[in-house]
Amino acid sequence: MTTQHFSVITIDGPSGSGKGTISSMLAQRLGWRFLDSGALYRLVALACQNHAIELDNVEAVVTIAAHLDVQFDTRTQITRILLEGEDVTDTIRTETVGNAASKVAAIPSVREALLARQRDFLGEPGLLADGRDMGTVVFPDAELKIFLTASAEERSKRRYNQLKDKGLDVNLADLLNEISERDKRDSERVVSPLVPADDAILVDSTGKGIEAVFQQVYSLCEERGLVKTGAHSAAAI
Ligand code: DC
Protein backbone atom coordinates (compact mmCIF):
# COMPACT_ATOMS: atom_id res chain seq x y z
CA MET A 1 0.00 0.00 0.00
CA THR A 2 1.28 3.46 -0.78
CA THR A 3 0.02 6.38 1.22
CA GLN A 4 3.25 8.39 1.02
CA HIS A 5 1.93 10.82 -1.60
CA PHE A 6 -0.84 12.11 0.64
CA SER A 7 -0.71 13.46 4.15
CA VAL A 8 -2.84 11.54 6.63
CA ILE A 9 -3.80 12.25 10.24
CA THR A 10 -5.59 9.45 12.08
CA ILE A 11 -7.76 9.91 15.15
CA ASP A 12 -8.81 6.65 16.78
CA GLY A 13 -10.56 6.00 20.05
CA PRO A 14 -13.76 4.76 21.69
CA SER A 15 -17.28 6.19 21.24
CA GLY A 16 -17.90 9.34 23.22
CA SER A 17 -14.25 10.36 23.46
CA GLY A 18 -15.02 13.49 21.41
CA LYS A 19 -13.28 11.92 18.41
CA GLY A 20 -16.00 12.72 15.86
CA THR A 21 -16.29 16.36 16.87
CA ILE A 22 -12.53 16.92 17.09
CA SER A 23 -11.89 15.13 13.78
CA SER A 24 -14.44 17.09 11.79
CA MET A 25 -13.34 20.39 13.39
CA LEU A 26 -9.74 19.61 12.51
CA ALA A 27 -10.54 18.54 8.93
CA GLN A 28 -12.45 21.78 8.46
CA ARG A 29 -9.72 23.92 10.00
CA LEU A 30 -7.00 22.31 7.88
CA GLY A 31 -9.21 22.22 4.79
CA TRP A 32 -8.55 18.47 4.46
CA ARG A 33 -10.73 15.59 3.31
CA PHE A 34 -12.55 13.72 6.06
CA LEU A 35 -13.27 10.01 6.52
CA ASP A 36 -15.78 9.06 9.22
CA SER A 37 -15.11 5.32 9.03
CA GLY A 38 -17.65 4.53 11.77
CA ALA A 39 -20.36 5.81 9.40
CA LEU A 40 -19.44 3.05 6.93
CA TYR A 41 -19.97 0.33 9.58
CA ARG A 42 -23.22 2.04 10.60
CA LEU A 43 -24.32 2.08 6.95
CA VAL A 44 -23.64 -1.64 6.58
CA ALA A 45 -25.70 -2.29 9.73
CA LEU A 46 -28.57 -0.13 8.48
CA ALA A 47 -28.50 -1.66 5.00
CA CYS A 48 -28.74 -5.12 6.62
CA GLN A 49 -31.71 -3.94 8.64
CA ASN A 50 -33.40 -2.48 5.54
CA HIS A 51 -32.92 -5.70 3.60
CA ALA A 52 -33.98 -7.88 6.57
CA ILE A 53 -30.57 -9.55 6.75
CA GLU A 54 -29.70 -11.20 10.08
CA LEU A 55 -26.27 -10.16 11.35
CA ASP A 56 -25.22 -13.78 11.88
CA ASN A 57 -25.68 -14.41 8.14
CA VAL A 58 -22.04 -13.47 7.51
CA GLU A 59 -22.08 -14.12 3.76
CA ALA A 60 -25.07 -11.82 3.21
CA VAL A 61 -23.62 -9.11 5.49
CA VAL A 62 -20.35 -9.18 3.55
CA THR A 63 -22.21 -8.91 0.25
CA ILE A 64 -23.97 -5.81 1.60
CA ALA A 65 -20.61 -4.31 2.71
CA ALA A 66 -18.97 -5.01 -0.66
CA HIS A 67 -21.79 -3.41 -2.66
CA LEU A 68 -22.77 -0.56 -0.35
CA ASP A 69 -24.50 2.10 -2.47
CA VAL A 70 -23.54 5.23 -0.57
CA GLN A 71 -22.94 8.87 -1.39
CA PHE A 72 -21.50 11.58 0.80
CA ASP A 73 -23.05 14.90 -0.20
CA THR A 74 -20.61 17.57 0.98
CA ARG A 75 -22.39 20.53 -0.63
CA THR A 76 -24.10 21.41 2.65
CA GLN A 77 -22.26 22.38 5.86
CA ILE A 78 -23.22 19.08 7.47
CA THR A 79 -22.35 16.25 5.09
CA ARG A 80 -25.53 14.40 4.13
CA ILE A 81 -25.20 10.63 3.79
CA LEU A 82 -27.32 8.84 1.22
CA LEU A 83 -27.85 5.09 1.31
CA GLU A 84 -29.41 3.73 -1.88
CA GLY A 85 -30.51 7.29 -2.59
CA GLU A 86 -32.21 7.81 0.80
CA ASP A 87 -30.93 10.43 3.27
CA VAL A 88 -29.90 8.43 6.36
CA THR A 89 -27.68 11.09 8.01
CA ASP A 90 -29.69 11.00 11.25
CA THR A 91 -30.91 7.41 11.14
CA ILE A 92 -27.40 5.94 11.30
CA ARG A 93 -26.69 7.81 14.57
CA THR A 94 -29.25 5.92 16.68
CA GLU A 95 -28.14 3.57 19.50
CA THR A 96 -29.77 0.61 17.71
CA VAL A 97 -27.73 1.17 14.54
CA GLY A 98 -24.58 1.86 16.64
CA ASN A 99 -24.91 -1.45 18.46
CA ALA A 100 -25.53 -3.34 15.22
CA ALA A 101 -22.52 -1.55 13.66
CA SER A 102 -20.30 -2.80 16.47
CA LYS A 103 -21.43 -6.36 15.64
CA VAL A 104 -20.85 -6.12 11.88
CA ALA A 105 -17.47 -4.47 12.58
CA ALA A 106 -16.35 -7.65 14.35
CA ILE A 107 -16.67 -9.68 11.11
CA PRO A 108 -13.19 -9.86 9.47
CA SER A 109 -14.49 -10.09 5.89
CA VAL A 110 -16.70 -7.02 6.41
CA ARG A 111 -13.62 -5.06 7.49
CA GLU A 112 -11.74 -6.32 4.47
CA ALA A 113 -14.62 -5.38 2.15
CA LEU A 114 -14.50 -1.80 3.46
CA LEU A 115 -10.72 -1.37 3.27
CA ALA A 116 -10.40 -0.13 -0.34
CA ARG A 117 -13.41 2.15 0.07
CA GLN A 118 -11.71 3.82 3.05
CA ARG A 119 -8.40 4.24 1.22
CA ASP A 120 -10.27 5.81 -1.70
CA PHE A 121 -10.75 8.87 0.53
CA LEU A 122 -7.02 9.65 0.21
CA GLY A 123 -6.22 12.78 -1.74
CA GLU A 124 -4.94 16.34 -1.74
CA PRO A 125 -4.38 18.31 0.38
CA GLY A 126 -4.61 15.54 2.99
CA LEU A 127 -6.97 13.19 4.81
CA LEU A 128 -8.23 13.25 8.37
CA ALA A 129 -9.38 9.70 9.18
CA ASP A 130 -11.57 9.02 12.20
CA GLY A 131 -12.20 5.51 13.55
CA ARG A 132 -10.82 2.63 15.58
CA ASP A 133 -8.12 1.12 13.36
CA MET A 134 -7.15 4.09 11.17
CA GLY A 135 -3.60 4.27 12.55
CA THR A 136 -3.08 0.53 13.04
CA VAL A 137 -4.55 -1.04 9.87
CA VAL A 138 -6.04 1.33 7.30
CA PHE A 139 -3.37 4.08 7.22
CA PRO A 140 -0.31 2.65 9.03
CA ASP A 141 1.95 5.26 7.36
CA ALA A 142 0.01 8.27 8.65
CA GLU A 143 2.13 11.32 9.60
CA LEU A 144 0.29 11.85 12.87
CA LYS A 145 -1.69 9.28 14.85
CA ILE A 146 -3.80 10.34 17.79
CA PHE A 147 -5.61 8.04 20.20
CA LEU A 148 -8.33 10.05 21.86
CA THR A 149 -9.89 8.61 24.98
CA ALA A 150 -11.95 9.47 28.09
CA SER A 151 -13.22 7.44 31.05
CA ALA A 152 -16.32 5.27 30.40
CA GLU A 153 -18.20 7.26 33.08
CA GLU A 154 -17.50 10.56 31.37
CA ARG A 155 -18.38 9.17 27.93
CA SER A 156 -21.72 7.82 29.15
CA LYS A 157 -22.50 11.16 30.82
CA ARG A 158 -21.78 12.99 27.52
CA ARG A 159 -24.04 10.58 25.63
CA TYR A 160 -26.73 10.96 28.32
CA ASN A 161 -26.70 14.77 27.95
CA GLN A 162 -26.80 14.51 24.13
CA LEU A 163 -29.84 12.21 24.21
CA LYS A 164 -31.58 14.27 26.94
CA ASP A 165 -31.08 17.37 24.79
CA LYS A 166 -32.88 15.55 21.99
CA GLY A 167 -35.79 15.02 24.42
CA LEU A 168 -35.20 11.27 24.75
CA ASP A 169 -35.91 9.36 27.95
CA VAL A 170 -32.60 7.71 28.88
CA ASN A 171 -31.02 6.02 31.86
CA LEU A 172 -27.41 6.79 32.77
CA ALA A 173 -26.66 3.36 34.25
CA ASP A 174 -27.98 1.63 31.10
CA LEU A 175 -25.83 3.87 28.91
CA LEU A 176 -22.73 3.11 31.00
CA ASN A 177 -23.44 -0.62 30.64
CA GLU A 178 -23.93 -0.32 26.87
CA ILE A 179 -20.75 1.74 26.43
CA SER A 180 -18.72 -0.70 28.54
CA GLU A 181 -20.09 -3.66 26.57
CA ARG A 182 -19.33 -1.98 23.23
CA ASP A 183 -15.80 -1.06 24.40
CA LYS A 184 -15.21 -4.67 25.39
CA ARG A 185 -16.48 -5.99 22.04
CA ASP A 186 -14.49 -3.41 20.06
CA SER A 187 -11.22 -3.94 21.96
CA GLU A 188 -11.37 -7.73 22.31
CA ARG A 189 -12.24 -8.62 18.70
CA VAL A 190 -9.62 -10.59 16.86
CA VAL A 191 -9.33 -8.33 13.81
CA SER A 192 -8.47 -4.64 14.07
CA PRO A 193 -9.24 -4.32 17.78
CA LEU A 194 -9.56 -0.87 19.33
CA VAL A 195 -5.97 -0.38 20.47
CA PRO A 196 -3.61 2.58 20.01
CA ALA A 197 -0.96 2.20 17.30
CA ASP A 198 2.56 1.89 18.78
CA ASP A 199 3.38 5.33 17.43
CA ALA A 200 0.07 6.99 18.44
CA ILE A 201 -0.05 9.94 20.82
CA LEU A 202 -2.56 9.42 23.63
CA VAL A 203 -4.87 12.34 24.37
CA ASP A 204 -7.25 11.98 27.35
CA SER A 205 -10.30 14.24 27.10
CA THR A 206 -11.69 13.36 30.57
CA GLY A 207 -12.64 16.60 32.35
CA LYS A 208 -11.67 18.74 29.34
CA GLY A 209 -13.88 20.86 27.08
CA ILE A 210 -13.89 20.40 23.31
CA GLU A 211 -11.91 23.60 22.74
CA ALA A 212 -9.08 22.57 25.10
CA VAL A 213 -8.82 19.17 23.39
CA PHE A 214 -8.92 20.77 19.94
CA GLN A 215 -6.11 23.15 20.94
CA GLN A 216 -3.99 20.21 22.14
CA VAL A 217 -4.55 18.23 18.93
CA TYR A 218 -4.01 21.28 16.69
CA SER A 219 -0.68 21.98 18.45
CA LEU A 220 0.41 18.42 17.63
CA CYS A 221 -0.39 19.09 13.95
CA GLU A 222 1.67 22.29 14.09
CA GLU A 223 4.59 20.47 15.70
CA ARG A 224 4.53 17.89 12.88
CA GLY A 225 4.47 20.64 10.24
CA LEU A 226 1.00 19.63 9.04
CA VAL A 227 -0.51 23.10 9.26
CA LYS A 228 0.22 24.75 5.94
CA THR A 229 0.48 28.50 5.62
CA GLY A 230 -2.97 29.89 5.06
CA ALA A 231 -4.71 27.56 7.54
CA HIS A 232 -6.52 29.53 10.25
CA SER A 233 -5.03 29.89 13.71
CA ALA A 234 -6.46 27.52 16.33
CA ALA A 235 -6.75 30.49 18.64
CA ALA A 236 -9.55 31.76 16.41
CA ILE A 237 -12.05 29.07 17.49
O1 DC B 1 -17.47 5.68 15.69
P1 DC B 1 -18.83 5.07 15.58
O2 DC B 1 -19.54 5.00 16.93
O3 DC B 1 -19.68 5.72 14.55
O4 DC B 1 -18.60 3.55 15.10
C1 DC B 1 -19.66 2.63 14.99
C2 DC B 1 -19.13 1.21 15.26
O5 DC B 1 -18.23 0.83 14.22
C3 DC B 1 -18.37 1.08 16.58
O6 DC B 1 -18.99 0.14 17.42
C4 DC B 1 -17.01 0.57 16.22
C5 DC B 1 -17.05 0.27 14.75
N1 DC B 1 -15.90 0.85 14.05
C6 DC B 1 -14.84 0.03 13.79
O7 DC B 1 -14.85 -1.13 14.20
N2 DC B 1 -13.78 0.50 13.08
C7 DC B 1 -13.75 1.75 12.64
N3 DC B 1 -12.70 2.18 11.95
C8 DC B 1 -14.83 2.63 12.92
C9 DC B 1 -15.89 2.14 13.64
Image (tube, rainbow, N blue to C red):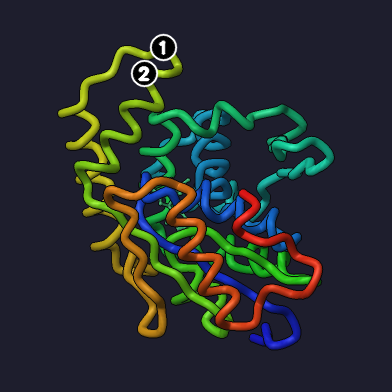
Q: Which residue is mark 1?
A: 167
**Residue drawn at the location 39% of the way across and 78% of the way down:** 197
Q: Quick check: can you spot residue 110? A: no
Mark 2 vs 1: CB contact within 8 A: yes
Furthest residue to the front? 235
- Apparent side of residue 211 relative to residue 74 in the rendered image (left or right): left
Where residue 33 sits: x, y (%)?
Answer: 72, 60
Q: Is residue 129 above or below residue 78?
A: below
Say what secondary structure mark 1 lies in.
Answer: loop
Q: Is residue 22 above or below residue 119?
A: above
**Residue drawn at the location 36% of the way across and 84% of the way down:** 198
Where residue 101 sits: x, y (%)?
Answer: 43, 44
Quadrant containing the N terminus in the rendered view: bottom right
Amino acid, disc 1: Gly
In this view, the residue in front, 13 or 68, is 13
**Residue drawn at the location 72% of the way across and 27% of the way down:** 86
Q: Quadrant of residue 69?
A: top right
Say what secondary structure mark 2 lies in.
Answer: helix
- Apparent side of residue 18 relative to residue 190 in the rendered image (left or right): right
Q: Which residue is mark 2?
A: 164
Q: Quadrant of residue 3?
A: bottom right
